[in-house]
Image (spheres, helix red, strand yellow):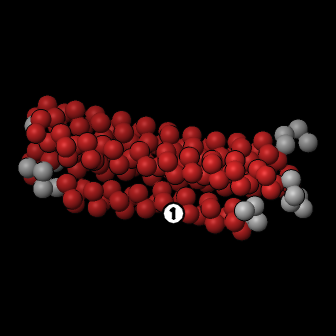
Amino acid sequence: MLISPESLAVLGGALALGGGLAGSSIGLGWAGSTAAATLAEEPGQLRNVIVLVSLPMTQTFYGLIILILILTSVIPNISAMPDPAGAGFAVFACGLIAASAECVSAAYQGAVCASGISLLPKTKGRILTNAMMLAVFVELLGVLGLVFTIMALSMLGLF
């Protein structure tokens, strides 16, 4: 085989982390750009802005958790599978699913946070709780991406 099952599994974990990093970067960029404009208008909103700008970072941690699980629990068990090559591709696919979920969730969470940030001056900060709740709905998809990936890896019998 040209690519070992272990290499495919590590590549899947790396994709999960890369998706989280990319999505968080996009989300932070959108929210941060809006934050700069909001702080120019009303510097007193700094605390609220920091809370909303930081929310899209969590998907990076979800991707990291998946990578760590693959490196510590999946890789040691993959060669014992009846079809290690198939298991390697399955782990790669799980990583791809996680990468997609984390990337899209973080990016759109940044868009939701940017909207909330832009309304902080107009509402004198009262929008913070509502904006956070709306951002949590988008966060849930990132959490589900993590949970579903762990479930899929578990169903494959890899840990």
The residue lying toward the viewer, choosing from 158 and 12, is 158
Q: Residue 93: where, in percent of width, then height?
A: 69, 53
Question: Type of residue at label 1?
Answer: Leu
What residue is rendered at 82% in x and 47% in y?
5
What residue is rendered at 24% in x and 56% in y?
131
Q: Is mark 1 on a helix, strand or loop?
A: helix
What residue is rendered at 24% in x and 37% in y?
34
Q: Is residue 1 left or right of residue 19?
A: right
Q: Is residue 103 visible?
A: no
Q: Is residue 50 left or right of residue 149?
A: left
Q: How many marks?
A: 1
Quadrant of the rendering where the C terminus is positioned: bottom right
The residue carrying mark 1 is: 144
Q: In this view, does 17 lie to the left or right of 57?
A: right
Q: Residue 1: where, in percent of width, then height?
A: 91, 42
Q: Can residue 134 be seen in this view?
A: yes
Q: Residue 15: where, in percent of width, then height?
A: 62, 43
The residue lying toward the viewer, choosing from 121 and 5, is 5
Q: Which residue lies furthest to the bottom in this view?
A: 155
What residue is rendered at 57% in x and 40% in y?
18
Q: Residues within 10 Å of mark 1 (few under 14, many from 20)?
A: some
Q: Is residue 82 above or below residue 54?
A: below
Q: In which quarter of the image is residue 114?
A: top left
Q: Residue 51: where, in percent of width, then height?
A: 27, 47
